Image (cartoon, helix red, strand yellow):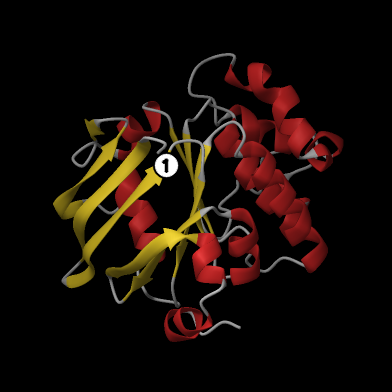
Amino acid sequence: MTEPILQVNNIHTYIGQFHILEGVDFSVRKDSILAILGRNGAGKTTTLKSIIGLTPIRDGSVIFEDRNISKLRPFRVAKLGIGFVPEHRAIFSDLTVEENLQIAERQNGDFANRAEFIFDLFPDLKRLYRMSGGSLSGGQQQMLSVARALVPENRLLLIDEPSEGLAPVIIEAMMRAIQELSQHTTVVLVEQNFRMASQLAEDFVIIEEGHAVANGKMADLASDQDMIHRYLGAA
C-alpha cells in the first residue's frame, strides 16, 4: 500500500463559538487524488483550511510527511510544500496573468522553472499573459488560480471547488489539467460536482455535519447508490 503523505487525525475546528469539525479522520496516499465530498455546509472547506492552518485546529493533529504541522502558521505550512487553491478563485484582478503568477513565487526563479509545465497545462494563460486578471472569463480565472499554486514545486495541492460556476466545456478542460498535474503532485480535492470527483479521484472521504462518516475507494462509492443518495443527494 502506498504510504500516506497526509494524515488528518480526529481534528476539531471552531469558527468563533461554532464547533465546525467534530472529529475528522482520513489519510491521503502519496501520488493520488482524494476527493472530500459532502453537502453544502458539511465542513469540507473548513477541512482544507484546517490542514493549511487558516482555521487552526483546537484538538487532533495534521501530519504531513511524518511531521506534525498542526500548530504551524499558514506561511510555514506552505513552505513545507503544500499549495492551496481557494474557493471563488481569489486572483488579483488589477494584476496581469504574468504578475499573478510571479507573486506566487516562494523562491526567486520558481516561475521561470515552472513556466513550461504551467503553460502546457493551461495554454490559454500563455496567450493571455499580458491581460489583467479581472478581464479573464470565469474559467480562465479558475485556471489562473490553480496555476498560481503550481509556481512553487508543491508536493501536496489542496483545491477547493474547481468546477464551481464553470461551463461544461471548461469543466472538462479543468478535469484534464487536474488529472495531468496529479502525475506530479498529490491532490486533495473538494468538489460538489460528483461526476467530476468520481472521474478524477481514486479515494474519497465524506464529511457530514463536521464528522468524517465514510471513506474508501471511489470506485466502491460510485457503485453504491444508497450511500450517494444518503450523504450527497446526487444521482
**Residue 5 appears at what percent x and percent y?**
37, 36
Q: Report the residue at 62% width, 34% height from top.
A: 183
The answer to whether residue 103 of the structure is visible from this angle is yes
Residue 126, picture quadrant: top right
* Residue position for label 1: 29
**Residue 224 appears at what percent x and percent y?**
51, 77
Tell me if 77 is positioned left or right of 103 in this view.
left
Choose between 136 and 30: the one closer to the eye: 30
Q: Residue at the left extreme?
A: 59
Tell me if 210 is positioned left or right of 176 in this view.
left
Q: Report the residue at 65% width, 22% height from top.
A: 114
**Residue 30 appears at what percent x and percent y?**
44, 36
**16 over 188 or under it: above or below:** below
Choose between 14 and 178: the one closer to the eye: 178
Residue 231, picture quadrant: bottom left
Q: Three-letter amino acid code at disc 1? A: Arg
Q: Report the residue at 77% width, 52% height from top.
A: 173
The answer to whether residue 140 of the structure is visible from this angle is no
